[in-house]
Amino acid sequence: MQLTVWTYEGPPHVGAMRVATGMEGLHYVLHAPQGDTYADLLFTMIERRDRRPPVTYTTFSARDLGGDTAELFKTAAQNAYDRFQPQAMLVGASCTGSLIQDDPGGLARALALPIPVVAVDLPAYQRKENWGAAETFYQLVRALAGPSAPAPGTPRPERATGVRARCNLLGPTALGFRHRDDIVEITSLLAKLGIDVNVTAPMGATPADIARLGEADFNVVLYPEIAGQAAAWLQRTFGQPFTRIVPIGVSATREFVEEVAKLAGVDASATLASASTRLPWYSRSVDSTYLTGKRVFIFGDATHAVAAARIASDELGFKVVGLGTYSREFAREIRDAAKRHDVEPLITDDYLEVEAKVAELQPELVLGTQMERHIAKRLGIPCAVISAPVHVQDFPARYAPQMGFEGANVIFDTWVHPLMMGLEEHLLAMFKDDFEFVDGAVPSHLGAGHSAAVPQAVPADPVAAAAMASEISVVWASDAEKELRKIPFFVRGKARRNTERFANENGVSTITIETLYDAKAHYAR
Amino acid sequence: MNVHVQGCTVAAEAAPKPVRRENGQREVFCGLTGIVWLHRKIQDAFFLVVGSRTCAHLIQSAAGVMIFAEPRFATAIMEEKDLAGLTDANDELDRIVAQLIARRPEIRLLFLVGSCPSEVIKLDLSRAALRLSQKFSPAVRILNYSGSGIETTFTQGEDACLASLVPAAPQARTGEAQLLIVGALADVVEDQFIRMFDALGLGRVQFLPPRKASVLPDIGPNTRFLLAQPFLTDTARALEDRGATRLAAPFPLGVEGTTAWLRAAADAFGVAPALFESVTHPHRIRAERALVRYRDQLGGRRIFLFPDSQLEIPLARFLSRELSMQLVEVGTPYLHREHLAEELRLLPDDVVLSEGQDVDLQLDRCRLARPDLVVCGLGLANPLEAEGITTKWSIELVFTPIQGYEQAADLAELFARPLVRRAKLVA
């Protein structure tokens, strides 16, 4: 057993739902008890989908367990076929469904439905959501595209001259982080290179589309967590090579363009020369000077976390101080990247461990999932979301891809906006001792009638004060405390923590003005 | 017995209303969801679900927001090896509980909450609770109940939780009759009722669940209890097993429901009618005045309620009698005829009631009827809105303070807002 407070990933059948819900013309019959329907709201509420996910739940209850749950499954599957008339059916069991061992695949076959039925067996007590999505997609691809596979060993025929290269875009699903917009961005980037998209899957694909995946010349793997396994099978079976570079960030996008151009046998130079993205110039412009060395903590799925670390360090000039992922399947990728950025990799799905790490590292910016957004909010650290799991606000109304050149623009804005503008920070530093800048001072344009509040010597919240006192054994001399208050409020907390840590580490029991500035010098970059 | 409601008398012998019973796919939460509000209500209790990753994912999705650093609930997620042998599963559970109690020393009551997988593999949590109680008593009391979807629907989780508290409650020593209010209410509502009962001179009034698990209400043959929620079947039975008597009443939703509910207590405790009138009158007048605006907005509108929390029947009574709405269909996951007898009498004779659910068939009926407003769960709301049908999320009716006089207009507002919004939007 594992004690869990919050979870980054749902169970594997939710991964299967993400594949099924992204597709058209597919229906998923899930052997599951009442209550598992909660998963519908992930799609209808978080992603604001205007249709129910194409999922039928058999809804067995305790009294059915003594009776015939297999019959219940067959009735549900037959009714779902009659009502929804899908092109293909996916069948499986949720965590409880798998315990009663009814064999949904065998039962569905016994119905002899006139459509392909794909059974997915997802080990709910070992695996999680992303694995479930990958396995489901792989099983669908095998079952639906498999029949048109050439005999093993057949070399892939050369593309006729004058015919444009075609590729498949693999990996986008329902509930994915910006998958909707990444597809648009990458499709248009490929079009500029003269490459057509044969099928995008699972998102938007029908079972008939999956059946013709083998017609493409190569595969573009947008999200390795979901499409890696299917792409490897397609390579073995159809001889289709697939891309390894995920086009998130300016450098990665340029490398991706070169990679696909090579696979497609086209010239990338015109596309690269005309590529338009503002990130490099915005990053060089003087206002961005203040971004230099900002300490950033990164956590998410491996693909987005690794890409974020590269952008943060090479394209924005931040300092990566922490890098981690919740997906153990991709631990190696994170370890390699952590080595490049000279940090300890954090591989865990324990939210409390991530929170403790953020608190310990005290970064100036957190890039993470919605879970890190909550951590950062509590700790008062600016944050931007870079990876699933995400919440409703991360499905924006506007076009906001992460991939490609426009994705780089979006990333610049999204990561820099939570921070303060350079000019603003400069002015604040310049005027920090101004009389109008002290606590409680009322801006002069609001008139003289507004009197400044009396500064309080102790924190207003006695509980917070007590907690602080119990954690920290050092005391502040009153002149040091006064000096601390001259520091702008938004960095004061950090200055206080740093000074106390410095005092603790150096055996100083009373913090004086000297200690304050010693600490400042110690932590100065 | 007759129910007196604002001067009118309704015959008790009305013929039982027909109910459509359905068994199919249910678009409802399981009983684990109750943890979301129960852990806020009982402030020194911790809820440990013994289940799967699905259970953990459900609770966090139902909670919607993740604002609590370390909430007072968690899931012991079972893994492959726990399924292989129950001895191992019990050892693992003991280890997890020890880890949890060490981490959260402020916890006074720990609920081990059963789930679908723990029920299917027959992990006996009552024995585990007994075993662990011996180990951690008296610092921590350990109880168990099931919130599994194979046994409980949504609010039945609260019923199972409260029923598990009843045997743990002390025996009442006093020979005098005492009032016990049963069912989780928002603190603000509870405080309003306390002031009201005080003004009626009812003396000591206790609540189940209590705000602190360390001060459970005392229960005995002189306990008279009033259900504040319509879904407390097992809790009521457990209380009756200890000799307590249920006071039959409608539920405190709307002015009429609140008055009849308070009157049931007042009558049982011999409160003079004049005193009852003088205490409740100003509140009734104020609440009725607040409702007028909503009657204009909602009167004559047709409403369809999908089954969700078992609050549907009292809500339908409020909507039809106090806001003049027309009931197209009133669905409930489970209909307890005895506890809802007073409510059912107040519904229109031709009301269409349904119990259980086959969601596809029910959606067919709903689309055919084209109601003005549909009350449904979060999985159905946006899809129906996209079809042009205005909806109200039912879960808000569980998470919002809606009981009592001061909340009657707030309750009406929940139904009016989607219609007002729909009328405002032009794009």
Image (tube, rainbow, N blue to C red):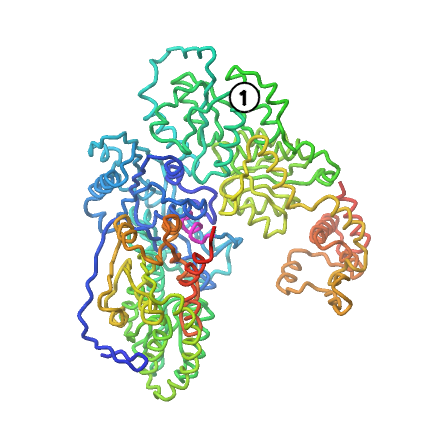
- Chain letter for mark 1, please: A
Question: Which picture quadrant has residue B1?
Answer: bottom left
Q: Amino acid at mark 1?
A: Leu
Residue at 37% from the left image edge and 67% from the top image edge: B183
Percent of width and height locating residue A412: 63, 38
Give above or below for A394 relative to B73. above
The prevailing secondary structure element of the residues shown in magenta is: helix
Residue A258 falls left or right of residue B60: right
Viewer-proximal residue among A210 and B117:
A210
Q: Is residue A373 found inside the magenta-colored segment of the image?
A: no
Percent of width and height locating residue B363: 29, 50
Viewer-proximal residue among B220 and B182:
B182
Residue A289 in view, yes or no: yes
Give above or below for B54 relative to A345. below
What is the residue that sits farthest to the front in this orientation? Answer: B426
Viewer-proximal residue among B146 and B285:
B285
Q: How many marks?
A: 1
Q: Which residue is mark 1?
A: A193
Percent of width and height locating residue A338: 60, 32
State which region is magenta. Answer: B56-64
Give the structural element (helix, strand or loop) at label 1: loop
Give above or below for A270 relative to A374. above
Percent of width and height locating residue A124: 37, 39
Q: Is residue B57 found inside the magenta-colored segment of the image?
A: yes
Residue B171 falls left or right of residue A436: left
Residue B244 in view, yes or no: no
Give above or below for B315 relative to A287. below
Viewer-proximal residue among B341 and B94:
B341
Mark 1 surroundings within 10 Å by alpha-carbon count, few (fewer than 14), some (14 through 19), many (20 or more): many
Question: Which picture quadrant has residue A401?
Answer: top right
